[in-house]
Structures are given as structure tokens and as C-alpha cells.
Image (cartoon, grey):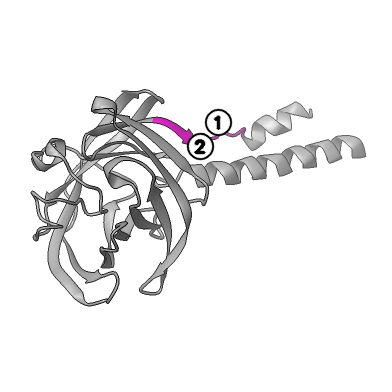
Amino acid sequence: MTSRRWFALALGFASLLTISGASASAADWQPLEIGNIWEYQGEGGDHQIQSIVGNQTLHGRVTAAKAYAEGVDAGLRNFWLLDADGSVLLAGFLLSDGFGVIYEPPIRYLAVPPVVGPQPVQPVTAYVYATDAVYATFNIRIDALEDVVLALPAGSFQAFGVAEVVSAPGPALGPVRALSLDGRRLGPVTAGATASEATDWYSEGVGVVQYRGYSLLQLVSFNPPTPVAHSTWARVKRLYR
């Protein structure tokens, strides 16, 4: 093989590694890169923009802050991180009025790889965000209830729908309450939901594509978009034979 062909082959392999790295990041079930933006449209004209705006350290853990820009959740920030296995963890939330909680340990919101069925009960202590005083202690269980394909404004997504099966107590954290675990304000569509109904739908590489908040909100767009599937090394080699 000539040196020129070897050089082209090396460039192809380098490009493959770059694309593969992007795809690996995109495979997260909750992409947490700063600058990611999700747009949702809900019933009755509800609209929401969510974005990763920075990092926040809570109880020694570096989390990603997701900010809400519109509607009843305007000013909300909730805090997320990924476990070593890729599971989606919720570390707490902070409302625009200054009320918030920190979860210890962070709540496993979606176990990865997702499997429809029961998950272990999680013992959690919630601390007041501003003072670190104990707010509540409780057990919670969040199960994946369904594996479905959703036809949404942004396209068709294979997604796992999750819900609290064993819910936390208290006015802010109980089964019929003003706030979800991540601080979203709830309306009748969620407050009246039963344990057999999913409330958040996760799709690999995109994150939450549909959720029950004050209404049912569905994904309109995600920026950056999910990268296309990358070429294989075998395909790269075939280009230079």
C-alpha cells in the first residue's frame, strides 16, 4: 500500500474515532452537556424550553443544572448526574422562590440499561437546599412501566416510560402533591395519575421525550440533534482497498 493510501486510511480511522466518541456521548439516556436544549409543546398551548446551563456541586458531587424557561416551571433548576453504569440520577432541585432540596443519595430515576419491571426500593434523605437541614426521609421506588414507540412532534422515538410506584410522603414530595421529585409543578394530569401510568419517557441519546407536568408535554426539538449512526472500521477499510 502506498504512503498516500496509508495516510488516507489513517485519516479515515481518526474520523471514525471522533464520530464514535460523539455517538457514545449521544447514547446517554440523559445527555448532560452544557448547551443542550429541549423544546416541548403541551396541551392547551403549554410550552417549555429546558437547557443545561452549567454545573453545580451538591454534597461533593458535580451535577448538571437543567433550567426551565417558561410557564409554571419558569426559573426551576433541577440537578442531574449519571452513575458509572449510565443510570440517570436526580440530585435535587431549586425553585425560583429559593425553596429546594438535595437528595442523599441521589435518586435513581432511570436504571440503565432500562428493563420493564420493578426496581429496588431506594431509601432517601431530602435536605433543605439553603440550610442543609433534614427536610424528610422516605423510601421510594421508580419503575420502568413500558417500552414503547412514541410518535411526537420531533419524530418517532423508542422510549421507556417510568413512574413512581412507591412514592415519597409530604406536601412537596407525596403522591398527591404540588411538586414532582425534580421540582416541576404538577397539574391534574399528573396529580391524578396512578402507579400504573408512566410520567416520564426516556429515549436513548435524547433524554426525556415526553413527560407529565402541569399537562402532557411532548418533544418538539432537541439541540444538538442526535448524531447519525457511525461507520464501522470495516467500512472505513473498504473505502481504501
How much space separates mark 2 and mark 1, taking CA atoms? 14 Å
**Does residue 216 appear anywhere in the picture?**
yes
Callout 2 touching callout 1 (CB < 8 Å)? no
Q: Marks 2 and 1: which is nearer the front?
A: 2
The type of residue carrying mark 1 is Val
**Hey, which quadrant is residue 189 in on the image?**
top left
> Which residues are the magenta region?
220-231
Give the residue drawn at x 12%, y 65%.
138
The type of residue carrying mark 2 is Asn
Is 175 displayed left or right of 67 in the figure?
A: left
Q: Mark 1 points at which residue?
A: 228
Q: Where is residue 59? Give x, y as percent.
A: 35, 74
- Classify the position of the C terminus by image quarter: top right
Q: In this view, does 218 lie above or below 59?
A: above
Is 66 displayed left or right of 127 in the figure?
A: right
- Classify the position of the N terminus by image quarter: top right
Disc number placed over residue 84 in the picture, else none: none
Q: Name the residue under label 2.
A: 223
